Amino acid sequence: MTRAASLRDRLVDEVEASGFGAHGLHVRVGDSAAEHRWTVDEREEIHSVAKGVSALAVGMADAEGVLSLDEPISRLAGDATLGRDVDGVTLRRLLSMSSGIDLPWTPTMMTDWPDLAAEFLSRDSRGRTFQYSNASTYTAMRLLERAVGDVEDYIRPRLFAPLGLDDVEWRRCPLGFVLAGEGLALRTEEMSRIGRLLRDRGVWNGERIVPGAVVDAMHSDWVSAGTNEGYERYGLGAWDGPGPAWRLHGAYGQLVILHGDTVVTVSADDHFRADAFAAAAVRLIAG
């Protein structure tokens, strides 16, 4: 039995013992892979796992010299009205949710204002303060669009096509821009390809499609996010933990957990038991 199959079996036991509402599981350890399904294999919304894809998009543009993660966003904002001290905020701070702009998540945020990005940028910054909100990632993608054109058109040949996801469509806001912090639907195995790319520092089937430094920044540029276990530090679209791992984490239990040469990917519909499963998965990876 391969290492991936052995870990898969232990994770299946954990899911069934805990009652975690998993739909699909994909495990990659080294070059071996194994998977298991509890429901029909179909594309599902990956929610905030898409924030990691957004970070890759900005990182690739940075590596190409189109923009900089660390330049003031005022250079990209055009004639947008900026709140106090927002002119010094950077794309890095938007992607790490540390702009200090107060606009918390609501389920209707895309339609609460005529233009969410304009509303976000018009509010004052309180300095390097963390607040988790889709508005931050969405605004980063709107600014990226000013530099590269349509974001989906930009990343399709650079990221989606090499991963075999060239038929994926990113859902749009009422203004026609990608939702950024959500809006991608993938099968479990398709989501695992993002994890494999991250594990291998941007190399896919022997070809570098994302600079290694971009992937490194996703889980090294941490900002303090709070005291809850697994949510103490946030990077560029990614969470630190549990334990020595790091992860992309979407609502309802969409997970891409990375630790060493192992990637555990889960599609689920169980928001409240996802944290316990992630912690158990890391213990099983290490054990």
Image (spheres, helix red, strand yellow):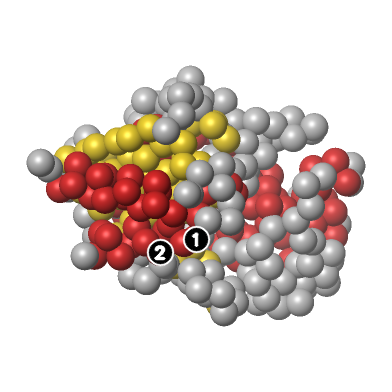
The answer, for residue 60, to whether it is visible in the render is no
Q: Residue furthest front?
A: 17
Q: Position of residue 11 (x, y in %)?
A: 32, 50
- How many numbered marks does the figure carry? 2
Assign a secondary structure to mark 2: helix
Q: Is residue 64 left or right of residue 29?
A: right
Q: CA distance from mark 1 to mark 2?
A: 6 Å
Q: The N terminus appears in which quarter of the rendering?
A: top left
Q: Secondary structure at mark 1?
A: helix
Residue pictured at 25% horizontal, 45% vertical:
9
Residue type highlighted by circle 1: Asp
Mark 2 burial class by Cα count in 10 Å: few <14, some 14-19, many 20+: some
Q: Position of residue 119 (x, y in %)?
A: 85, 54
Q: Nearer the viewer, residue 200 or 190?
A: 190
**Mark 1 highlights which residue?**
275
Q: Nearer the viewer, residue 168 or 208?
A: 168
Residue bearing mark 2: 279
Q: Which of the 4 quarters of the picture holds residue 73?
A: bottom right
Whether residue 1 is situated above or below residue 82 in the rendered picture: above
Who is closer to the viewer here, 266 or 192? Answer: 266
Label disc, if present, on residue 264 of the rendered structure: none
Residue located 23% across and 49% down the image: 7
Residue at (39, 52) in percent of width and height: 17
Left/right of residue 200 with respect to residue 41 in the rendered view: left
Q: Residue at x 74, y 30 (%)?
A: 176
- Mark 1 is surrounded, within 10 Å at the Cα level, by few (under 14), some (14 to 19) or many (20 or more) other residues, namely some
Q: Is residue 173 visible?
A: yes
* Contact, mark 1 vs mark 2 (Cβ under 8 Å): yes
Residue lying farthest to the left in this orientation? 1
Q: Quadrant of the C terminus?
A: bottom left
